[in-house]
Image (cartoon, helix red, strand yellow):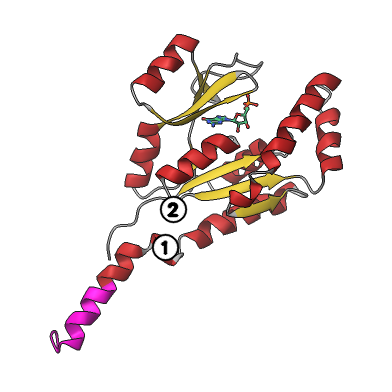
Amino acid sequence: MAEKKGLVVVLSGFSGAGKGTIMKHLLNKYPGMYNLSISATTRGKRQGEEDGREYFFKTREEFDQMVEKGELLEHATFNGNSYGTPKAYVQKLIDEGKDVILEIEVNGALQVKKIFPDALLLFVTPPSAAELKNRLVGRGTETPEVVAQRLAISSKESLLMPQYDYLVINDRIEDSVERVHEIIQSAHYATKINGAQIAELQEELKAFSKGENK
Ligand code: 5GP
């Protein structure tokens, strides 16, 4: 059988939807099965974050240089900061047949879909807008202005949801982790990403139908 490429999986969702938590649980529950792409960003490091673990923290100049050199697969601005996906790591993993997950915002996600039409796009949302607001307020870390700002961004992002392949309604975290896992695993069997295998079988069958290989 022809060698299989890994899948590019994009996970997006509203701020407060719990996509980071889903990712953490997914990586813990299925060790070695998924690889998370680490983005470059110009935003400042938050407490507890480490360079090279959550993000590669860059100055504006460094980030712009990465863009100029074509080192980023996609990049976008979110809340005044730049974020981008380093290209080399993603390419290396899919060439090795490994799945790679990009936890990125909507504009970047749609850029990825253009570059990798077979990429699987998942959108994570809480069960309702009221629940989203509750979660943002409940964090207790954001001022009411920031909460309002995040909700306004969510409202804009929601317009792009129909362009995603799957919706993950994050009610119970364990269920969401399982759902994401099942969606990714099922995607491996999609005919559209198994074109090489199909072509190989077709060739073999053609040979048989000509009476060869009896
Ligand atoms: P935060 O600053 O809260 O870590 O991330 C803000 C937003 O940027 C989140 O929606 C996150 O998914 C998104 N993001 C993180 N890395 C990237 C990236 O490499 N590219 C894009 N387009 N968005 C990213």
- On the rendered image, what quadrant is the C terminus found in? bottom left
| Other residues around mark 1 within 10 Å, as few (<14) / some (14–19) / many (≥20) | few
Q: Provide the residue designation for mark 2.
A: 118
Q: Earlier in the sequence, mark 2 or mark 1?
A: 2
Give the extent of the magenta segment: 201-214
User: Contact, CB < 8 Å: mark 2 with mark 1?
Assistant: yes
Residue at 71% x, 54% y is 175
Whether residue 59 appears in this view of the structure is: no
Given the image, on which type of amino acid does mark 2 rest?
Asp
Position of residue 21 measured from the top left corner of the image (x, y, whole percent): 67, 38
In the depicted structure, whether residue 26 falls above or below residue 42: below
Q: Residue at x 53, y 44 (%)?
A: 10
Q: Which residue is mark 1?
A: 192
Kind of residue sitting beneath label 1 = Lys
Q: Report which quarter residue 48 is drawn in.
A: top right
Instruction: Report the front residue among 170 and 59.
Output: 59
Q: Position of residue 126 (x, y in %)?
A: 77, 45
Residue 88 within the magenta-colored segment of the rendering? no
Badge 2, how many Cα within 10 Å: few under 14, some, many 20+?
some
Q: Secondary structure at mark 1?
A: helix
Q: Which of these two is toward me, 191 or 108? A: 108
Picture disc at residue 154: none
3 sits left or right of 29 in the view:
left
The secondary structure type at the circle numbered 2 is loop
Q: Residue at x 64, y 56 (%)?
A: 179
Mark 2 to mark 1 CA distance (whole Å): 7 Å
